[in-house]
Image (cartoon, rainbow, N blue to C red):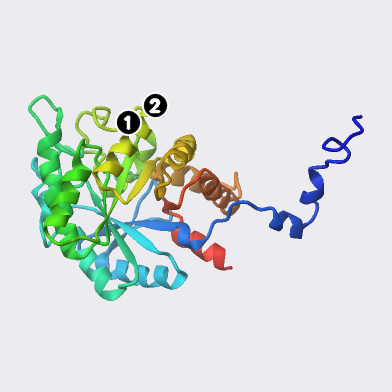
């Protein structure tokens, strides 16, 4: 046994862990309601509610029901919601024109939410996959390749239509090159100086998006079967920093890493390197795993969810998109 300061028994790490008060005093990170962004799925119609089999507890809601949910979420203190439209099959096309329809489902949902619950931050998804007949995020050439510049031109129209509908934050999730700069330019030109851009900068070609593709109905359509030619290779880390650097230079206000749990090393590196507002998406497959194990009684769902989200804060995230947002806000209040 060593017998000098700094070593056992002078230093006993367990002293500070002994009591609740000292554990609280040395706690380094905390999850609060201010960290939560709630992704939601919106449907056509009125008083419509559909369950999603691979995401128990998550529903697709028509705009009227979504507005009620937004009121409850605002009362719980959730700062923002991210809306994802479920486009009827007949509105999909090869050119995805529905994406920038000023009266499209997403645009109407934004207007309804901002009118009813103005204090709720509204985030829109900028990508073409809910609107293309082939389910890819961009426009396709005759070989099945996703065209970059043609897609960016479409995304710019889509983002502008969201800003004009009143979206507070537009969030390009498509991974085309140069889209942040082009969207920023067009927003400036049209006087939308304060529309924030949340760039999905480091979006990986992940298998954890499966349940989301069921939820928006793009899975069955997905021609080519994967998004490898534009989403990032899960093996890469330096490349994520390069992506973030470009998006910040092009005018992004906030950057995102996606998915969450298997990518927290990326969150930490990006936060350390850039110090910019950094978000992480706790994606549908992560939700499905926790929910399934919870339903089966294999894990304590609440404890595991809170631990997973705290881990994201500890990794450096300033906020978390999670399908558990409303539930977590309720747990935090209890
Ligand atoms: C598509 C988009 C996806 C998600 C958000 N926007 C799926 C994809 O890229 O295929 C996934 C979210 C989730 O899995 O929760 N632009």
Q: Quadrant of residue 331?
A: bottom right
Label 1 Cα crowd, 10 Å radius (few <14 / some 14-19 / many 20+): many
Q: Quadrant of ligand 1?
A: top left
Residue at position x 21%, y 37% in the image = 176
Residue 13 position, x and y percent, is: 79, 43
Q: Where residue 195 sits in the image (x, y, percent)?
A: 24, 59
Label ID, residue 292 = none
Residue that sits furthest to the bottom in the current view: 116
Q: Is residue 178 above or below residue 20?
A: above
* Along the viewing direction, whichever of 77 and 72 lies nearer the viewer: 77
The answer to whether residue 249 is above or below residue 30 is above
Res. 236 mark? 2
Cβ atoms at labels 1 and 2 below 8 Å apart: yes
Determine which residue is flagged by label 1.
Answer: 232
* Res. 54 visible in picture: yes
Query: Where residue 126 appears, x then y in whole percent?
Result: 22, 49
Residue reaching furthest to the front: 5
Q: Does dot 1 land on a helix, a strand or a loop?
A: loop
- Tell me if 55 is positioned left or right of 63 in this view: right
As measured in the structure, the alpha-carbon distance from the residue carrying label 1 to the one carrying label 2 is 7 Å
């Amino acid at each position: 046994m060593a017998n000098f300061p700094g070593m056992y028994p002078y230093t006993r790490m367990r002293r500070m862990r002994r009591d609740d008060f000292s554990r609280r005093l040395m706690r380094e990170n905390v999850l609060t309601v201010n960290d939560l962004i709630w992704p939601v799925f919106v449907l056509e119609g009125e008083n419509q509610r559909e369950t999603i089999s691979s995401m128990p507890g998550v529903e697709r809601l028509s705009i009227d029901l979504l507005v009620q949910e937004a009121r409850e979420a605002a009362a719980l203190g959730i700062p923002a919601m991210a809306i994802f439209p479920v486009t009827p099959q007949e509105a999909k096309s090869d050119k995805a024109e529905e994406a920038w329809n000023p009266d499209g489902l997403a645009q109407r949902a934004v207007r309804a939410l901002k009118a009813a619950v103005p204090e709720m931050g509204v985030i829109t998804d900028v990508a073409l996959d809910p609107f293309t007949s082939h389910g890819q995020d961009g426009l396709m050439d005759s070989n099945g390749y996703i065209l970059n510049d043609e897609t960016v031109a479409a995304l710019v129209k889509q983002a502008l239509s969201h800003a004009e509908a009143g979206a507070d934050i537009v969030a390009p999730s498509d991974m085309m090159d140069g889209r942040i700069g082009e969207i920023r330019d067009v927003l400036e030109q049209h006087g939308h100086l304060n529309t924030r851009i949340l760039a999905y900068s480091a979006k990986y070609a992940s298998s954890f998006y499966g349940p989301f593709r069921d939820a928006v109905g793009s899975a069955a359509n997905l021609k080519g079967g994967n998004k490898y030619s534009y989403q990032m290779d899960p093996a890469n880390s330096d490349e994520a920093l390069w992506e973030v650097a470009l998006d910040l230079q092009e005018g992004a206000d906030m950057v995102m890493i996606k998915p969450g749990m298997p990518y927290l090393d990326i969150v930490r590196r990006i936060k350390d390197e850039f110090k910019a507002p950094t978000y992480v998406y706790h994606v549908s497959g992560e939700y499905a795993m926790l929910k399934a194990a919870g339903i089966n009684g294999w894990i304590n769902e609440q404890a595991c969810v809170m631990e997973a989200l705290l881990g994201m804060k500890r990794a450096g995230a300033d906020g978390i998109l999670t399908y558990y947002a409303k539930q977590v806000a309720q747990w935090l209040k209890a």
